[in-house]
Image: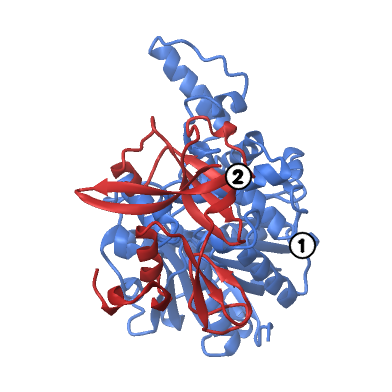
Amino acid sequence: MGRLARKVALVGAGMSKFGNHFPVKRNPDLWIDAWLNAVESVDNGIEPKDIDACYVGNYSSDLFNHQGHLGPQMANLVGLTPKPASRFEGACASSGIALRQAIIAIASGVHDLVAVSGVECMTELPTAGVTDVLATASDSLFEYPAGATFPGLYATLASAHFHKYGTTEEDLMRVGIKNHANGAENPYAQMQSSIADMMKSKIAKIEKSGGDIPDWKDEFDYLKSSSNPIIAYPLRLFDCSLITDGSACLFLTSGEVAKKYTDTPIWITGTGQGSAALSLHDRDSLTSFIATKEASTQAYQMSGLRPKDIQICEVHDCFTIAEIVALEDLGFYEKGKAVEAIKNGETKRDGILPINTSGGLKSKGHPVGASGAAMAVEIFKQMKGKAERNRQVKFNIERAMTHNLGGSGGTCVVTIYER
Amino acid sequence: MRGDHENMSEGEKDFTIQSYLEFLQNRKLMGSKCKKCGALYVPIRKLCTKCNTANMEWVEMSGKGELAAFTSITVGTPYFIQKGYDRNKPYCFSIIKLQEGPMVSAQLVGIDESKPDTIKIGMPVKVKFLETEIKGESKIDLGFEPN
């Protein structure tokens, strides 16, 4: 148990532009954009006829778009019919699960080449509707009647983290400031603007309308102002990830087949998945995610690596507090110590452990079912030295990780990549 | 209410979600206690996940506990918007650690939701059954207030 029977390689990865696309683009349109982008990323080219199966991660097309059964619908867009095509669901970890299942299918010998994707078109519903759909990823029976929203559950965890470790609102804000600075360098991100630039354009707008110029000294002043309203205390608007339409696509092959597509495959050497009670009240800890601990322990064991070996990681920052908790649960920092490392700049692009160079869910966007696959797209680009604009990290990456969390932590998938 | 169990006496109720909710409508916060190992569950479970035995008995909670975690929500769920909450009138979602051990999710009332920094984790609370009337139908939701 716990090892891959065959080597598994990532030979291609791409994504659609993330943003507000409905009705100009719907699920199939977003998915085909990601597919074409992924095909382009394969060094020696790839054709649909090479592919054995199509795995699609999607959270809730049923409720967002009144459409279930996305597997065969997407596969047909590129002529994969009648090959096997399946949809995987685990809330925001849906395409992380699809990725893991493809790894297992290839390692087992059943498939040699699987197209793994994720897609979500959320803006077909108004914001209140999106909030309600997201709430179905938590417990509808006992949390919902008590008023739980998705941000509310993470805010509740934040209150416990604040109480236990002295974490502050400024600590949360540093995560958002960093991730937006990264997203500004990602042409596929939904919000390609740093928080400092957003503050400046807000001031310019107020100036133009003849209003009182706010006396914001820095981003923190701006983020504490009414321009950044509280959604669920202590989380404000800029602590929350975005409502996004988007898709991502990956090509996974067996070790032998990989050579046909590239001389420099990215090897997947570890995969792990964990679960937890859906309700926060049913868990032993309110300051850490047991599913993350389980998933990462499995992935570390499989790869033979330890937390200190990981050089770059995309973590699931659906809310700023989630990034802090993830850095602790993945073993990069002791409980309560991640905020200090963030403050010291360790997790910035030029730090010793760059986190969310893509901009994260916070700035790149969070089309929930596509987010897990999109994390692997960033790792692929960074490991190949192909990250756009100014966000390529300056050292050679040998070992990387993605961390994809579902709902309020009920599911977690962790993947380890090596060169 | 549908089903056969409405004629059952309290002690005979099956360990289902519906039974738990029916108790709640009668202003009783009930748990299920494993007759074999004594593990206590609120909300209830039919199978004890500590000793893998399905042999439970109903026990009523004292309704006393402490605040374990909370948030004050300005952008609420459709249900709470229906109840009259909004940006200018936030509500408090909380996790309460019961005196008996288990934790539950509940609305926290009797505090100033608009001043969340005055709400303190660890403060003692007691149960308050919250009656809501929506479209002529009355319903009890689990709530707590400072004790």
Q: Chain of mark 1?
A: A
Query: What is the x, y in percent for residue A197?
Result: 54, 28
Q: Is residue A229 left or right of residue A69?
A: right
Chain that is coloured blue in the picture: A
| Res. A267 image quadrant | bottom right
Pointer 1 and pointer 2 on the same chain: no
**Chain to which mark 2 belongs:** B
Query: Which amino acid lies under the numbered mark 1 shown in the image of this protein?
Result: Pro
Name the residue: 29% across, 73% down: B6
**Looking at the image, which is closer to me, B41 or A276?**
B41
Residue positioned 46% across, 40% down in the render? B109
Q: Nearer the viewer, residue A17 or A404?
A: A404
What is the x, y in percent for residue B146?
54, 40
Task: Give the CA distance from mark 1 to mark 2.
Answer: 40 Å
Tag 1, which secondary structure? helix
Mark drawn on residue A307 = 1
Q: Colour of chain B?
A: red
Q: Which residue is mark 2?
A: B124
Residue in front for this viewpoint, B35 or A66: B35
Taking the image as drawn, is residue B21 in sight?
A: yes
Q: Quadrant of the C terminus of chain A?
A: bottom right
**Picture layout, residue A1 above or below residue A277:** below
Q: Quadrant of residue A55?
A: bottom left
Q: Nearer the viewer, mark 1 or mark 2?
A: 2
Q: Amino acid at mark 2?
A: Pro
